[in-house]
Amino acid sequence: MDTTTSIKMTTLAIQNLFSYVEEENLLALKSHLDRFKEVDGRSDNGQTPLMLAAEQGSLEIVQELIRRGANVNLDDVDCWSALISAAKEGHLEVVKELLENSAYIEHRDMGGWTALMWAAYKGQVDVTELLLENGANPNTTGQQYSVYPIIWAAGRGHADIVKVLLETGAKVNCSDKVRSL
């Protein structure tokens, strides 16, 4: 087999892998991974199948990919990780699975946001609690705007998250570039 044919086959295999994840077709995914071992193949934007499954909240797919050796700490071109994607979307069980498999809790996306910041911003109370229980820093700030999770939560009306953040040591006298809390 020449190099061009090999690259085309690899590309097709990765496309199929993503299709099975997107369709949440666990049986086809298992069969595919029995034949093609590459579990961390990437899309054009650098996303891995695990990142897609985490974003979708597909717990069984996430578990299978991890069992097959998926790296839970890879990120895409925007520095999004599987943990950030799952936290943002509120997929509690997926977040648990990723943390149990050593996902880096303080990983930052391109804007400097952590999984906790996204969970607080999006109003994901259970995910926020879980991340804090697992050691997420309640006083972390983004790089671009230096906004604390408590400011995002308060500004978006997520009183339950503000309460949880305060109970875990979030600063009360903090500010962003525009306002103070």
Image: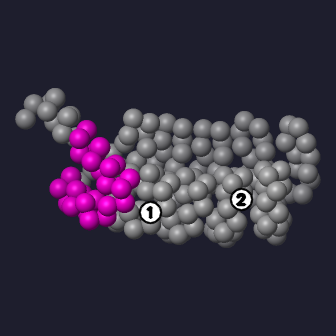
Q: Is residue 24 magenta?
A: yes
Q: For the magenta stretch, what is the residue range?
A: 11-36
Q: Residue at 77%, 38% (x, y): give it.
A: 145
* Left or right of residue 70: residue 85: right
In this figure, which residue is indicated by the disc labeled 2? 123
Judged by its main secondary structure, the magenta piece is: helix
Q: Is residue 26 magenta?
A: yes
The amino acid pointed to by label 1 is Ser
Q: Place residue 69 in its image quadrant.
A: bottom left
* Left or right of residue 175: residue 13: left
In this figure, which residue is indicated by the disc labeled 1? 58
Residue 21: where, in percent of width, then height?
Answer: 36, 55
Residue lying farthest to the left in this orientation: 1
Circle 1 — which element?
loop
Residue 42: where, in percent of width, then height?
Answer: 37, 42
Residue 22 to residue 169: above or below? above
Residue 74: where, in percent of width, then height?
Answer: 46, 48
